[in-house]
Amino acid sequence: MADSADAIRINGTAVEPPGDPRVSLLDLLRERLELHGAKKGCDQGACGACTVLADGERIVSCLALAVQYTGREVVTIEGLTGEDGPHPLQRAFVEHDGFQCGYCTPGQICSAVGMAAELERGVPSYVTDDLAAERIAPGRDEVRERMSGNLCRCGAHNGIVAAITETYGTEAR
Amino acid sequence: MIPFTYARAENAADAVRLGAADGVKYLGGGTNLVDLLRESIERPTTLVDVTGLSSAIEERDAGLLIGAAARNTAVAEHRLVRTRYPVLSRAISSGASAQIRNMATVGGNLLQRTRCPYFYDADGFRCNKRNPGEGCDAVDGSNRTHAILGASSACVAVHPSDLGVALAALDADVHLHGTTGNRTVPLTELHRLPGDRPDVETVLEPGELITAIELPAPPPATRSAYRKVRDRASYAFALVSVAAVLGVEDGRVTAARIALGGVAPKPWRARTAEAALLGGPATEQAFRAAAEAELADAKPLRDNGFKVELAARTITAVLGRLAREQA
């Protein structure tokens, strides 16, 4: 185990960064740690299937050099599941048919968890009417815009939006 | 990806010391550079990570100083940006995806490379940015997304930044740190037009680093907006984008700053349009005439003639909306 300043904390475990700085965070997760939730879809930041959370912020791990993430706290889909079972959003994805093949789902869910935190702190999107709003409601248009970095080739986007709005919408509060 | 060494800079002086050697590239969020490394289009021997440098966003005089390591999201969500510089918040929010905005830095955004497909396809096509002097296959190729203003026969690529377009309209200055000290250049002069050297994209000296962006106070009694027109509703580069700051009093234009994205090799400040508008009537006819004056020198290529009319319409529509908000 590496000491905490030089380590990347991944799902609560300290991991030594790779010796070769070319290794992406995604390759570190998949090839060395055998965390296969994050997917290598395009490997160029276009599809979002590799989305994970770094200090609570969603990022695409394919464009992240792992060495840049020392001292950071990375959470993958494997780390979102608690001791009492799936994350509420995972349950909602099942409930709303938010996937068919499931390939993009870990990225979708990590992305939506990060999105919810952005909404809470008032991060505006391109479709937000009132840029000065303190907090932004996750309506359908907001969610569609904010989730545009996660593609689903099966076309489950309607179910994905439904699962997210049910989990984080005002009716769920 | 060829092998490289990695070093983390503690501060700007440290970065410039490390960056002075040959083969060094500065690394921000990596969202463009990592992709270019993977394609072996960028082939540095050392990456100097500058994300540990200042990312502070603070009031400076009546304006705002933004550390170059500030992430795009941090700028877009900052209270003073949202309330005083809405054009900047909106422009950033229109760019890339949320994940990429969380990673990308302000300095890196300005220094990102073009997404011209001929620049990316090292195996199949010629590109004067990649291999100076070998020729450009975009000039007579598939050039629907390419430049109509400011290009040359050597290069017709566009600069992809949205953030830079808003900064151009806001009269931003870029703070630079290099081996010979500090200097400041206007954002509109950071990028060069291609001429016969499209591989030289900015006025940065070797090893020189962007450390901050400074925004002057927004001109009083103005409103600002950013509109981006693209092939799909989200997560796409601009075909045309317009950043505008407009002041209207008693039906006349008191202030006008306009910049265009998606149409030129750099964020394109539309000074001809601005001059045509200033002091004149704030009417749709005047807005359209100003847009046409700006685009009079446009040189459309085989596939991108639509951008001329699209830019004219988008300028007219954005100015019209800003004028109505002040009626």
Image: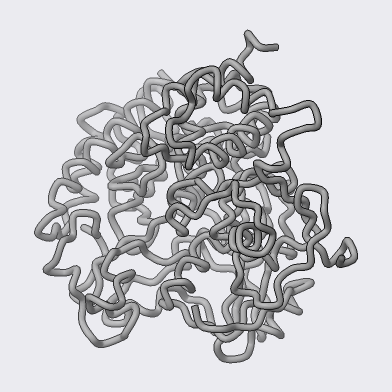
On screen, residue B91 above or below B222? below
Q: Nearer the viewer, residue A81 or B327?
A: A81
Q: Position of residue A7 (x, y in %)?
A: 82, 63
Look at the image and tell me whether residue B258 can be seen. Answer: yes
Look at the image and tell me whether residue B72 can be seen. Answer: no
Which residue of the protein is positioned furthest toward the left in this rendering? B302
Q: On the picture, is B1 further left or further right than B232?
A: right
Q: Position of residue A73 (x, y in %)?
A: 77, 51
Q: Nearer the viewer, residue A104 or B32?
A: A104
Which residue of the protein is positioned furthest toward the bottom in this rendering? B22
Picture residue at 50% right of the left edge, 46% below the top: A49
The image quarter containing residue A70 is bottom right
Q: On the picture, is A49 further left or further right than B71?
A: left
Which residue of the protein is positioned furthest toward the right in this rendering? A3
On screen, residue B163 above or below B255? below
Picture residue at 28% right of the left edge, 47% below the top: B239
The image quarter containing residue B194 is bottom left
Q: On the picture, is A16 further left or further right than A29?
A: right
Which residue of the protein is positioned furthest toward the top in this rendering? A171
Locate the C terminus of chain B by quadrant: top left
Picture residue at 47% right of the left edge, 40% below the top: A150
Q: Position of residue B94 (x, y in %)?
A: 45, 40
Q: Position of residue B188 (x, y in %)?
A: 44, 61
